[in-house]
Image: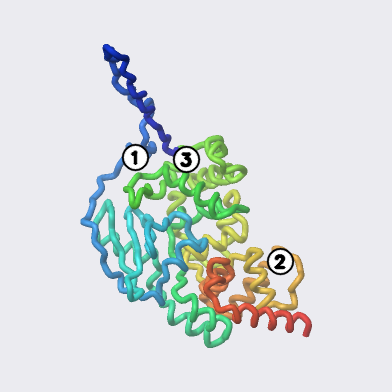
Amino acid sequence: MLSLSFRLTSLPIMKRHRPKPTPIPIPPPTPPLFTTKPRSQTHHNPTKKPKSKWVPLNLTQSELSLPLTFPTGQTFRWKQTGPLQYTGVVDSHLVSLTHLQNGDVSYCLHHTTTSETSARSALLDFLNVGISLSEIWEVFSASDPRFAELACHLGGARVLRQDPLECLIQFLCSSNNNIKRITKMVDFVSSLGTFLGTVEGLQFHQFPSLDQLASVSEDQLRQAGFGYRAKYITGTVSALQSKPGGGEEWLASLRNMDLQEVIDALSTLPGVGPKVAACIALFSLDQHHAIPVDTHVWQIATRDLLPELAGVRLTPKLCSRVSEAFVNKYGKYAGWAQTLLFIAELPSQKALLPAHFWSTKEKKSTKTKNG
């Protein structure tokens, strides 16, 4: 449930009547009928609060650029809490990340329910540090001059390894939606989880378990502005709860399957189509060659990979062809290449690229079409 905010009405200033003032008794303030905390805050886990300190993460900016990783559509639970600083929750750990003056990344652990060692390990896993960005980008750049040019300006755009349930629910919220509304919906869902703390005035919660998600009804989600997505979320939660061994275990098991098996399995859940399934597969299930195809990726593909399809309407069959084209071009980490190419199309990032870059590419694209 979202927290309810209350404002105590200030008492009127007492006017003095001359010549003899008459004191007016001031009643004690009436306590609020409801607590201002979300319901989940009444069920705190025993939380350890480490001393706030910034610790090096041994990651350079070329391996992790925070502005190119967190606000670019992979996750909607991390908030900007300062210049080049982002704060979020990994498992039960409340963490901030920032860039030092030399570009290296440091982290600050605000709260944890276990230990600082466990928190660091979980953070590194979430950041997918087992994969060297510089190594795979070197391979991409050798086969694609355009990628090489982009990489010089947009280094450090990393693919995260999120919790599968958290990733699934977020992308159910993303269907036919904009980032502002998606974030509002994800914040509502997050408030069902255990409250972990506040950073720069923003509240952070552990992502809710399936049981906690099941406590909210479709009507409540609709009242919160989820629209038709409400039935998909409640339906998916119900479907996961019915899985033998538990839904969270079932989702984690998909990491051991082939990509098409993963897409097929996820597509059995209410509201999950090929694009949402590909997003979940890429951002949480170790399917590094998954390609989420939307209109933006379609434009990239028809401009740079399949120019013969420019002007053709995107269909499910053509989505498969786009995915194949990316994999043929970039190999087993094609999803990472597609992520950078997608980020480069965002208006906020386009502005960082030299003007000649886009004009040159547009000329080449036009020449190819007219060729």
Q: Earlier in the sequence, mark 1 or mark 3?
A: 1
Q: In front of the other: label 1 or label 3?
A: 1
Q: Secondary structure at mark 3?
A: loop
Q: Residue most toward the bottom? A: 142
Q: Secondary structure at mark 1?
A: helix
Query: What's the residue type where badge 1 is placed?
Result: Gln
Q: Residue most toward the left? A: 51
Cβ atoms at labels 1 and 3 below 8 Å apart: no
Query: What's the residue type where badge 3 is placed?
Result: Ala
Residue 71 at least partly seen: yes
Q: Secondary structure at mark 2?
A: helix
Q: Residue most toward the front? A: 19
Q: Is residue 190 above or below residue 307?
A: above
Out of 340 and 159, give the one closest to the viewer: 340
How packed mark 1 is, by other alpha carbons closer than 10 Å (few <14, some 14-19, many 20 or more), is some
Task: Kindly report the distance in space between the C-alpha atoms of the residues bearing marks 1 and 3.
Answer: 17 Å
How packed mark 3 is, by other alpha carbons closer than 10 Å (few <14, some 14-19, many 20 or more), is some
Out of 124 and 300, give the one closest to the viewer: 300
Name the residue rendered at 70%, 63% in the picture.
316
Q: Which residue is mark 1?
A: 41
Q: Earlier in the sequence, mark 2 or mark 3?
A: 3
Q: Which residue is mark 3?
A: 214
**Picture quadrant where residue 90 is located:** bottom left
Name the residue rendered at 27%, 12% in the picture.
20
Task: Please tell me the numbered disc located at residue 317.
Answer: 2
Query: What's the residue type where badge 2 is placed?
Result: Lys
Image position of 143 (left or right of 45): right
